[in-house]
Image: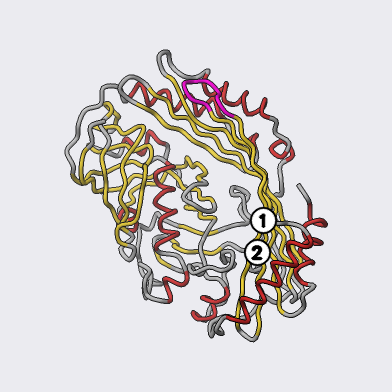
Amino acid sequence: MWGEDRLTALADAALTIGGDVEAVLSRTDSALTRFAGSRIHQNTSRLDGEARIRVVLDGRVGVVATNDLSYDGLHAAADKAREIAALTPADPHFPGLTPAGQPYGRTAGPDEETLGCPPQRRAELVAAALAELPAEVDAAGTMETSVQERAIVTSTGIRVYAAGTRATASVLAQGATSSGWAEAGATAIGGLDCAALGRRAGEKVLLGASPREMPAGSYPVVLESGATTNIVQWLGWLAFPGRAYNEERSALSGRLGEQVCSPLVTIVDDPLSPLLPGTPFDPEGTATRRTSLIEAGVAVGVAHDRATGAVAGTGSTGNAMPAPNSMGGLPTHLLMNAGGATMDELVAGLDRGLYVTRFHYTNVVHPVSTSITGMTRDGTFLVEDGRIVGGVRNLRFTQSCLAALAGCEAVGADVELATDLFYGAALAPAVRLSSFTFTSTTAY
């Protein structure tokens, strides 16, 4: 880590050009261990840094990004950003740079064990997962540790810094006719139980052997935490962005205050949660906070940056993305509240339905209806009379996220951190849904 003093002092280089300037610096140091065929085959490390310099001239905005984190590099980027601003039409919706003086919350900061994690430690965790696999089952997957630090310095007087760590692991177990998946993430490597991941993935292989074919149709389902989290993340893209809401392209446009999900569903954005790797400020320097999005099934809010918040009359919710940004505010630290049901209790509530471990290759079909498509993967099972009776071949689905959560009948206590889908992190529990639409079958 470079630390607060070095990063903020470096950002000062951009401010030497004078005028309205914002410098956002970030650095990520990550290390990844990959394994396949139940053997480690690759260790990689990646150190990357970026500076985004925004210059404002009478409402005209120029932005330049650079990987040259040197005094001369940042000064040159600021000069180029000012040239761009001089040639750019004024933005009538730009509210100006964030003023100083706001209080900031606190996050946990970097975990020392994760920060200094050697490849041998990651290999030990991989070995712990592989040791739990049944005979004749191989596995592939990853074990990654990373630290990210960010600093923002502006001509308005903002001078802030934060750093945090993350550890993630995944196990894909493969048998002769079936596969199983398990993953986990935490803000510290000590929060990972890789032996449990190997055990879960291996059990799914045995349970799903010789899968039967199920016809397409609508079924009640139990979704594991990873599948639910995928749905919540898509809502982050399709329902909660402030610009889409303002422009009536969001499923929640004009619907705040309405019941849009089951009363069992509460979703918030909370970069300050100890469960998620977050920062006390967004890329505009606005203080982050817990923002309610759906409370007991009722739509209560969306995510705004300074520009979309000004249009909406609400102000920023601390959800800006790095400039230039066409999305407006995005919730990048989503949390769906857990319930109290065990996995056995969730399954026991199904007379006949499907149990889904995770979704694969999901994509959007219709943004306003929050409809997505994808397929099940690595552990899809038939449930009869409240118990899992065997594996089924994977199915493709097309389903509205909000409609699925409107049929939420029970919420589990088990959650797992997801850090994929292009941004941020999310955490959601397992759920039982009254209906989920599967549109076609597969051959595996």
Q: In the image, 352: left or right of 94? A: left
Q: Residue at x 38, y 33 (%)?
A: 344
Instruction: Inspect the magenta stretch and tell me whether residue 282 lies in it.
Output: no
Name the secondary structure under disc 2.
strand
Q: Quadrant of the C terminus?
A: top left
Q: Quadrant of residue 80?
A: bottom right
Q: In the image, 256: left or right of 437? A: right
Q: Amino acid at mark 1?
A: Asn
Packing grade of label 1 (10 A; few <14, some 14-19, many >=20) is: some
Q: Which residues are magenta?
A: 35-42
Q: Earlier in the sequence, mark 2 or mark 1?
A: 2
**Which x, y percent locates residue 400?**
30, 56
**Which x, y percent locates residue 24?**
68, 63
The disc placed on residue 67 is: 1
**Which SS does the magenta portion mostly show?**
strand
Q: Residue at x 35, y 67 (%)?
A: 251
Pointer 2: what residue?
52
Packing grade of label 2 (10 A; few <14, some 14-19, many >=20) is: many
Q: Give the Cα distance between marks 2 and 1.
A: 9 Å
Q: In the image, 247: left or right of 270? A: left
Q: Nearer the viewer, residue 210 or 63?
A: 63
Q: Determine whether 352 is above or below 309 in the image.
A: above
Q: Amino acid at mark 2?
A: Arg
Q: Nearer the viewer, residue 28 or 420?
A: 28
* Picture colour scheme: secondary structure
**Which x, y percent locates residue 318?**
59, 67
**Which x, y percent locates residue 254?**
37, 76
Q: Residue furthest top?
A: 135
Q: Residue at x 73, y 61 (%)?
A: 73
